[in-house]
Amino acid sequence: MLRRIKNFFKTPKGLVTIILAVLIAMAAPGQGFRAVMAGLVSASMAAGLVDLIVLRVRKKVWEFPSGAVLTAMIVAMVLRAQEPWYVVTITSVAAVFSKYLFRSRSANVFNPAALAIIASFYVFHTGQSWWGALTDVPVPAKVVLLAAGVFIANRVNKLPLVLTFLGAYFLLFTVTAFVSNPLALAEIFRTPDVEAALYFAFIILTDPPTSPAKYPDQIVCGLIVAIVSYGFFEWAGVVYYLLAGVLAGNVWEAWRRANRRTGSTFPKGLGAFLYEISPFGERA
């Protein structure tokens, strides 16, 4: 048992769990430890229990729901710390269900935390403070986020994806600031938006099941996510502009995988692809 636990914490999921736990320990005191932990603990337990049961039914064996726990941690760290505990919990459980509702033959299509957080915005009118990105800690402590993020991105071999996204993202906003009103875009380069972008790039964007493995595909995906995120900020003005970007990247990646497998081309294979990733599509 101890050996299995040790081996788990050597895996990417285990390492991300440790990193998120460290970030939570650093950020929670400034947000109100009791309020933060109520939502975090309840969400992790509820999402984990749901995934535990689903995994048992699907695989006929008991398996620790590490993915659901990670998802709940991310949901709690992105939503406002002041959100009621039941909102964080419901959002996390919805994220787990989304993994099984929207699937291609190989994996879930959408990043579950991103999809559920956007849904909660419309259902519960939730806010996003990204407190888990160390937005309210002293500047020297923010180095932990950067160092941990680079480490995990390198560990899952997604550095080209991260660098492409961050480069294109800040370049788009920089160019726009020079040709329009820079004051309107100043927040992008300040706390908490900078930390949110880093957390997003390192933790959410690099989700292995929903992001490409090959470097050329990572570059394309990073550009798509950056452009869509920029577009949602500039023209829609929604708080979830980063999460909208990653969902666009998820769709592109799922479509690319489907085309690679079937040999379909756009737009010929679009209808079949949309059916496949829907809750009504066929499963492998």
Image (tube, rainbow, N blue to C red):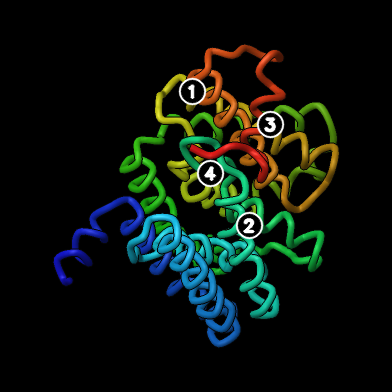
Q: Amino acid at mark 2?
A: Thr
Marks 4/3: CA–CA distance = 13 Å
Question: Residue at left 69%, top 13%?
Answer: 268
Q: Which residue is mark 1?
A: 217
The local crowd at label 3, few if under 14, some if 14 to 19, many if 20 or more residues have their Cα within 10 Å, is some
| Secondary structure category for the residue under label 4 | loop
Which numbered mark, 2 or 1, is in the foreground of this view? 1
Residue 246, quarter of picture: top right
In terms of sequence position, does the residue under pointer 1 or pointer 4 come before the other? 4
Residues under numbered marks 4 and 2 in contact, where contact means CB atoms less than 8 Å apart: no
Q: Which residue is mark 2?
A: 191
In terms of sequence position, does the residue under pointer 2 or pointer 1 come before the other? 2
Question: Residue at left 66%, top 18%?
Answer: 269
| Secondary structure category for the residue under label 3 | helix
Most foreground residue, 277 or 111: 277
Q: Which residue is mark 4?
A: 108
Most foreground residue, 149 or 45: 45
**Residue 31's x, y, as percent?**
59, 78
